[in-house]
Amino acid sequence: MKYEETIDAICNASRLKMLINSHKGDIEQLDPKMAIELAKGELNELLEAMEADNYEKAITECGDVMNFIISVGYNAIEGYRRRK
């Protein structure tokens, strides 16, 4: 697959950030609206990293964005399952 290496790198960044931030609690406990707002902040950091040609930081920021999206997705799936 064309993007497999990219997906792997971002997933690895996501996993690392989840691990080192695990002391903050379970990310799915965030209110989804708050998680989206936090993701927007991480997108701004991603933009700054790209504008500075800091690609290692950009990959890390992709992981951060992904983690907040995972939180929202987790809650969406759980909400869907509760409806059935």
Image: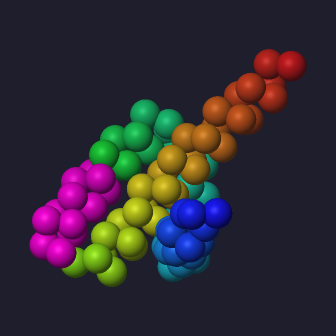
Q: Residue furthest top?
A: 83
Looking at the image, residue 51 sits to the left or right of residue 31; the answer is left
Q: Position of residue 13 (x, y in %)?
A: 50, 74
Q: Residue furthest right?
A: 84
Looking at the image, residue 67 sits to the left or right of residue 62; the answer is right
Q: Quadrant of residue 7?
A: bottom right
Residue found at x 46% / y 65%? 63
Image quarter hosting the N terminus? bottom right
In the rendered image, is residue 79 in sight? yes
Is-magenta flag for residue 58? no
Q: Overall secondary structure of the magenta stretch?
A: helix
In front: 28, or 49? Answer: 49
Residue segment shown in magenta: 41-53
Looking at the image, residue 82 sits to the left or right of residue 70; the answer is right
Q: Position of residue 50 (x, y in %)?
A: 21, 66
Image quarter hosting the C terminus? top right
Residue 25's place in the image compared with 44, above or below, is below
